Image (cartoon, rainbow, N blue to C red):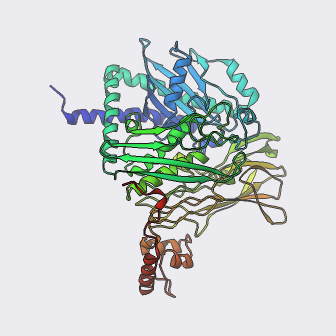
Amino acid sequence: MTSTNQDRGIEMAILANRIDSIARKMANTLFRTARSGVLNSGHDFSCVVLTADCRLVAGAISLPAHVMSGPDEIARYVKEMHPDMRKGDAFLHNSPYHGNSHAADHCLVVPVFDDGGVHRFTVLAKAHQADCGNSKPTTYIGSAVDVYEEGALIFPAVQIQRDYKDIDDIVRMCKARIRVPEIWWGDYLASLGAVRIGERELLSLGGEVGWDRLDAHVEAWFDYSERRIASAIGKMNKGDARVHSMHDPFPGAEDGILVTVGVQVDPDAGTIHVDLTENPDCLPCGLNLTEGTARSSAFVGIFNALGDHTIPANAGSFRRLTVDLRQNCVVGIPTHPYSCSVATTNLADRVASPVQRALAIISPGYGMAEGGPIFPPAGGVISGRDPRQNDVSFVNQVHLGISGGAATPKHDGWLTLIHVGNGGLCRHDCVEVDELAYPVAIHERRLLPDTAGPGQTCGAPSIRVEFGPAEASPIQVFYNADGMINVAKGVLGGGTGGPAQALKRGRDGQLTPQPACTGVWLQPGETIVSVSSGGGGYGRPHHRSQDAVLRDIREGLLTASVAETVFGVLLSPSGQIDQAGTDAARRRLEQDMPRQPDAETLPTP
């Protein structure tokens, strides 16, 4: 009996979900057993399955910035450095110059060999560390002029297990340099458990269905994914755009960083091309992207723009996407020893956001506005000593309040996106859990009105957080904020999101503005006030549903005065919509609106 197309489709769906479930099991293991808050609360990790020849098969609930590009390069580099890999091996890798994101993301890489000694798959777990041995107690040093000032331990494809046993030399190195060695050890074991479960489950699946059948499935899955993305691109307009985004002034980049993104859509060929070569050389700061984060950021912008989030993100769909990078470029391929300490966030978003904005202009109804730039203090790294636990040292990144979601053609911005690169998969901390785990007190966390980028759909509003020491011991907060000056842009007539802010409140209650990149010491009685960036709006604000505007007013996200002047919605004394006044106001706004609000990025004829 010959199988039908329906039978093959059913088998493909089942096996694709089986492999995806393996990546999910890996992620669940890491999440539930990790020791640091950035992993077991913030969810800043990713787990993937790759083919033996280093192509991404499944990433489940991984962060897009971690896995769209990079794991393939890491796996290739591990194979190159260790051509005699065997069952029971495990490798520690975090080099930003060899495929990784930044040094704080420790990757454990395990090759999966069948009983005959054939290399079948590779599994990888990438986990952001509470501390990675930097020269300062933070995993992001935006001011580092080079990797030496950054100070992180760099492990370029270093073997850490042989025959399923730890190589203690490497473990001792980490424990001797990392400020919170027991936290690192717990997170290492969590990552190791994740990759070993991935190995076990793949061996079980291969034994159940047969390796040849599984190999055939993977190739068919890649082909299917390629057809899906080609079909989606085929529905877009043909055109190209050249879009700019500007990072705020920063140590090592005192005039800011202008990022230029070229995007070309060819629906006939079913391809999208992104050019990042027209950008500055690497800079003496920690903002330089790695090859993995530069390419991933472009991919993130494309996948966000397509609007069909059922398209698998794997090596098959990536065949239709090309990204031009150049050596020694701030958003390209970094040259050693330039620092890439902040490679997953700031400039990465300054690539992804323009890509999705350009695609909206080329093909209205697709794309997104710009996401809110990051990281304000509420997403920073806190450190100090905990008097409740015999003055033990602590270091951890917090996610206390970062919004930034960009408006889409159909929906308002995702309130808890955090930033474009993690796709909303990182999680906001529970206030009570952070206060139990660390000697901090969170005094306020609330949304701010009139900070969402206005549009037919609106960006996410800003979040204001105030926190400080809870005990008679100071804490330090490191952060690298963007968006204080150059806010998130809207698209197709949409407005900009609110700016980020960082303020220190003294014991006298006075607020003092803080730099964009710093490590603020907070003494008992002092606090830091963090305001996150709002996301940009999509489409003309006076085209927004009147009911949606009224809902925003009632929920405290919008004041009546802004509703009138920006959205053209007037309220009666009873708090209902004044229909006559609203109709007149919206006619005036339509007449006053520029005919082409995005002239910078018009599609070419």
Q: Which residue is drawn at 43% across and 78% down?
A: 591
Residue 186 falls left or right of residue 311: right
Above or below — where is 69 with respect to 533? Answer: above
Q: Residue at x 69, y 47 (%)?
A: 253
Find residue 14 and report its horizontal and vertical position in percent.
Answer: 32, 35
Find residue 427 and report its horizontal and vertical position in percent.
Answer: 57, 49
Depth check, front residue: 399 or 156: 156
Depth check, front residue: 526 or 233: 233
Find residue 330 and report its horizontal and vertical position in percent.
Answer: 61, 41
Residue lying at the far front of the rendered structure: 605
To which quarter of the image does residue 58 belong?
A: top left
To which quarter of the image does residue 506 belong?
A: bottom right
Q: Which residue is drawn at 31% across and 25% down?
A: 216
Find residue 260 and report its horizontal and vertical position in percent.
Answer: 54, 49
Residue 515 falls left or right of residue 192: right
Image quarter where the N terminus lies is: top left
Q: Can residue 175 be seen in this view?
A: yes
Above or below — where is 447 with respect to 238? Answer: below
